[in-house]
Amino acid sequence: MPIKLDETEFDRIVAKAIENIPNEIRQYLENIVISVKKRPSRRMMREMEIPPGEYPLGLFQGVPMIERSVTVPPLYPDMIYLFQEPLEEMCETREELEEEIEVTVVHEVAHYIGMTEERLEELGYG
């Protein structure tokens, strides 16, 4: 049976999961806004080319560090969206949910900083 939490409790688990992220990755969160949504919007689904009925757990929106220019700064803040309902649907316990949120945030930060899959594996997130 999937876990189901109210927004406040889910936010607490997100904060706890972020604390568990190694500093090598967590340091990049200082410049990223993390937002929780129930599910991705239709527009997000189209942009990610996700078929109907499938839902991502998270999404990075912004300009990856490797694509940044000193002369042309990003127009909007970098964002990581976490999608509460899809995350809850795949987890049966608070511990599983916390772990899945941690993994999701780490993968989204990896998109931002251009981290390789190999390095993610070395850190235990592969």
Image (cartoon, helix red, strand yellow):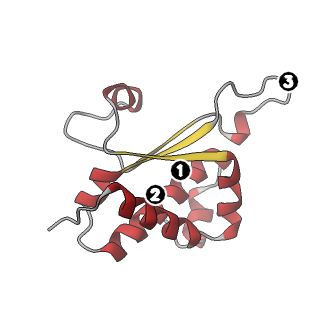
Q: Do callouts 3 and 1 mark residues in contact (Cβ within 8 Å)?
A: no
Report helix, strand or loop for mark 2: helix
Left-right relation of 27 to 125: right
Neighbor class of circle 3 (other Cα within 10 Å; few <14, some 14-19, many 20+) is few
- Quadrant in which residue 42 is drawn: top left
Query: Which three-letter amino acid code belongs to the residue tagged 1?
Result: Glu
Residue appearing at x 51%, y 56% in the figure? 105
Say which residue label 1 marks: 108
Left-right relation of 21 to 27: left
Q: CA distance from mark 3 to mark 1?
A: 25 Å
Query: Which three-letter amino acid code belongs to the residue tagged 2?
Result: Thr
Residue appearing at x 71%, y 28% in the figure? 74
In this view, 76 is above or below 25: above
Q: Do callouts 1 and 2 mark residues in contact (Cβ within 8 Å)?
A: yes
Point out residue 102 in the picture as x, y percentages from the top left corner.
48, 65
Say which residue label 3 marks: 71
Point out residue 123 in the picture as x, y percentages from the top left corner.
59, 71
Q: Assign the N terminus to one quadrant of the image.
A: bottom left
Q: Which mark is residue 70?
A: none
Say which residue label 2 marks: 104
Query: Which three-letter amino acid code belongs to the residue tagged 3?
Result: Thr
